[in-house]
Amino acid sequence: MTEKSGLHTRNLHRNPYDFEQLISCVPELRQYVFINAYQTVTINFSLPKAVKLLNKALLLHFYKVKNWDIPDANLCPPIPGRADYVHYIADLLAEEQGEIPTGTSISGLDIGTGANLVYPLIAHKSYGWKMLGTDINQDSLENAQQILDHNPDLSDVIQLKKQINSDHIFKNIIELKDRFTFSMCNPPFHDSEESALKGNLRKTKNINKSKVQKTLLNFGGQQSELWCEGGEIAFITKMIHESVFYSTQVLWFTCLVSKKDNLHKLTTLLKQNKAVDVKIIDMAQGQKISRILAWTFIPQKNRKNLFFN
């Protein structure tokens, strides 16, 4: 049993999946489990249903989230990679405190939480943080609310809010009285539906190690989750410009960046907008290398008093 060494050291999913344990949580998963040519117990990750049931089992077993489910059309995220983002944010906050801060005094904002609500669920279950999840899609928010309804212990610590204008990210969400220790976002990566389908075809071929012709979105995803005009660079550029107006209300703005080539333009833009600290945190998600771009406008000497009291 070898560890998935690319994952964060606190990630609960570093070890290979114990499928018997997971099947005991979600019996329906059993029909998708098989032994592959390498004598490894696994599932077919190109099947959306199999991935969704695996997620349901992981969230129940490791995080005690009951009755997690999403519509077939929505993005079904890989849980280990999502957990990594949360743990690296914890490390970032620990730099200010000397230790990882826990409990509801830490408040996080998840931009584009989707129907799956995975980041707020893992963030609260791992560290006790209070979370606000936002989205432009009403159906996604309604499904996220159903997840919360099945887990009443989360009703006071995870809230949802609709972004009423798709041209904005923080505006309409952050109010004058609000203070967030961090924001997080997994932005739309592609610039068109065609690009999203081609990207998924390449991913599916890599999973199956064979020639796959059908562009099946094995992790699902609707338009707002997978692509936007201008793709990742346009979305994060907008996020940076808008973050300036909320520079005293959020300690650390963070966002995933999939394309390494985008980093130079984004970090240059942050310097132009007077960010006082910019960090790039490398993060492995399976075969994919991603990174977290983090920035703040708060001078270091002021951070503890403003956000950790």
Image (cartoon, grey):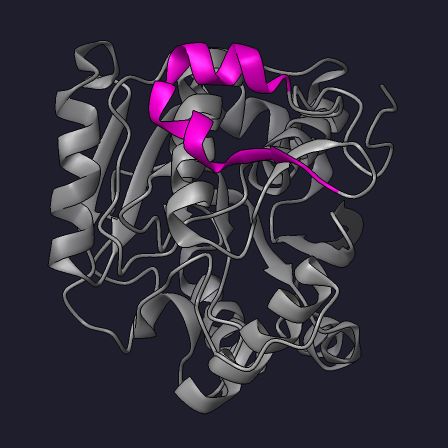
- 62 lies above or below 147: above
Could you tell whether 139 is left or right of 48 in the image? left
Image coords of residue 171 (percent x, y): 27, 63
Q: Residue at x 73, y 19 (%)?
A: 10
Is 21 one of the magenta-colored residues?
yes
Q: Is residue 110 left or right of residue 20?
A: left
What span is in magenta? 18-36
Q: Is residue 141 magenta?
A: no
Q: How many marks?
A: 0
Q: Main secondary structure of the magenta part?
A: helix
Residue 12, quarter of the rendered image: top right
Residue at horizontal 45 percent and vertical 37 percent from the top: 119
Residue 149: give x, y in percent of width and height: 12, 23
Give the quadrant of the N terminus: top right
287 vs 99, nearest the viewer? 287
Residue 90, by quadrant, is top right
Q: Would residue 214 be seen by someone viewing this image from the given angle? A: yes
Residue 192, percent from left and from top = 43, 88
Decide if residue 115 is on the left or right side of residue 17. left
User: Visible in this render: residue 104?
Assistant: no
Q: Residue at x 40, y 81 (%)?
A: 228
Residue 15 rendering spot, x and y as whole percentages: 75, 21
- Compared with residue 180, is residue 211 higher up or lower down, i.e. above or below? below
Q: Nearer the viewer, residue 249 or 182?
A: 182
Is 130 placed above or below 300 here?
A: above
